[in-house]
Each structure stands twice: as structure tokens, then as C-alpha cells.
Image: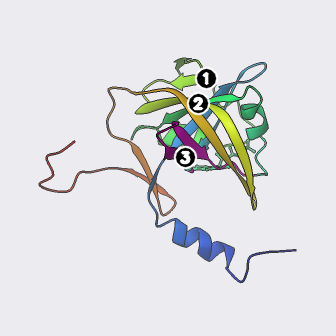
Amino acid sequence: MSDSGGVDAAHFRRVFGHLPTGVTVVTAFGVEEPVGMAANSVTSVSLEPPLLLLCPARASTTWPSLRERGRFCVNVLAHDHEGLSRRFAASGIDRFAGVPWHRRQAGPALDGAVAWIDCEIDAEHAAGDHTVVIARVLDLGVSGAYRPLVFFGGRYGTFAPAEGDGAA
Ligand SMILES: Cc1cc2nc3c(=O)[nH]c(=O)nc-3n(C[C@H](O)[C@H](O)[C@H](O)COP(=O)(O)O)c2cc1C
């Protein structure tokens, strides 16, 4: 039975589509091969200790393989990574085929990503049709690429500083 409390699902999606987000690909070393999925539900949570959160759907078939090793790497996609975002959300393909990556301690780091964050699962909380995963950050860094991929209204774009804003 639905527990929507009268909130229409399409309306919910449309309104939250107005909250711009970055796009990440969460990766791990699966038992046999690398695994990964696109996710925009990543947020920093705490500095002491350093924690982030990620919300995988309960229906996700990739999350069980990602969590198996207890560690994953969050790759923040760059402005020219729209294809990677689509690829890591697609079903029935080898998502890593032809995708250049290098090893980090918690999972594959995608070449050209804006930033990477290695982490270890700390806790999981059931939250409706998703799970809130809290993970401890082990190590993190930024690459030379600076322009991120931005998701807004179901479309992809990038960030442009406001006019007159000289700060980075
Ligand atoms: C921009 C973008 C953001 C996404 N964010 C999430 C997310 O935060 N959590 C999630 O479970 N799925 C998210 N997805 C969908 C998953 O990437 C995709 O549904 C999933 O990988 C489907 O395959 P699976 O059954 O292999 O998990 C997102 C997809 C896109 C394109």
C-alpha cells in the first residue's frame, strides 16, 4: 500500500528537480570486477569525525555489490562527464568498459573527476524506499579539473561563477 501521505510522486520529483546538485559515481572493487553507480544524494555530514552520506534506492541492484567490501570511492564528475553519468545509471551494460580509472584504496577513481573521496561504511538507516548510508571518510582530494557536472530539472549543465565574483 502507498504511504505517500497525499504527496504526488511526480510532483515530488519535479519540485526536488529544482534543487541543483553535483553528480557523483560511487565505485568499489567488487568481488570479481569494479562496480559503480551514478548518485546525486551524496552530502557531507560531519567533520569530527569526517562523515558523508549517500542514499541508495532499496531497489538498486548495484548497491549490494558496492557495500560488500565495506568501502567505496565517491567520484565527483566533471562538466564533460554527462556520458559517464548516463553510463553509470544504465542497466544491462558493462559500465566500466572503455572508462579510464586508477586505483584508490576504497575503489576505482575515474580519470578526470573533479574530486574523489575514499570512505568506509559506518552505519545504514532504512528511510522509506531508500537507505541512508553514513560513511567515514578515509582520504579525499581534488584533481586539476575544476568545472563540475551539475544536474538540474532532469538536465545536465555546469557551474558558472556569478558576474563580478573573483573568488574561487
Ligand atoms: C544524475 C543521477 C543521480 C542519481 N542518484 C541516485 C541516488 O542518489 N541514489 C540511487 O539509488 N540512484 C541514483 N541514480 C540512479 C542510479 O544510478 C541507477 O538507477 C542505478 O544505478 C540503476 O541500476 P542498479 O539497479 O544497477 O542500481 C541516479 C542517476 C542519475 C542519472
Q: Looking at this rendering, what residue extends furthest in the front direction?
A: 48
Residue at 56%, 37% in the rendered image? 25
Estimate the x, y position of residue 165 in percent, counting from the top left: 15, 52
Dot 3 alpha-carbon crowd within 10 angstroms: few under 14, some 14 to 19, many 20 or more = many
Classify mark 2: residues with Cα within 10 Å, few (<14), some (14-19) or many (20+).
Answer: many
| Disc 3 and disc 2 in contact, CB within 8 angstroms | no
Q: In this rendering, would 48 be left or right of 6?
A: left
Label 3 and label 2: CA atoms lie apart by 12 Å
Does residue 49 belong to the magenta stretch? yes
Q: Amino acid at mark 1?
A: Ala
Q: Earlier in the sequence, mark 3 or mark 2?
A: 3
Instruction: Check disc 2 and report the residue beneath it.
Output: 119
Residue matched to label 1:
106
Q: Are marks 1 and 3 in contact (CB under 8 Å)?
A: no
- For marks 2 and 1, the one nearer the N-term is 1
The reply to whether the C-beta atoms of the residues labelled 2 and 1 are less than 8 Å apart is: yes
Up the image or down, 102 lies above or below 83; here it is: above
Q: Of circles 3 and 2, which is in front?
A: 2
Q: Nearer the viewer, residue 135 or 101?
A: 135
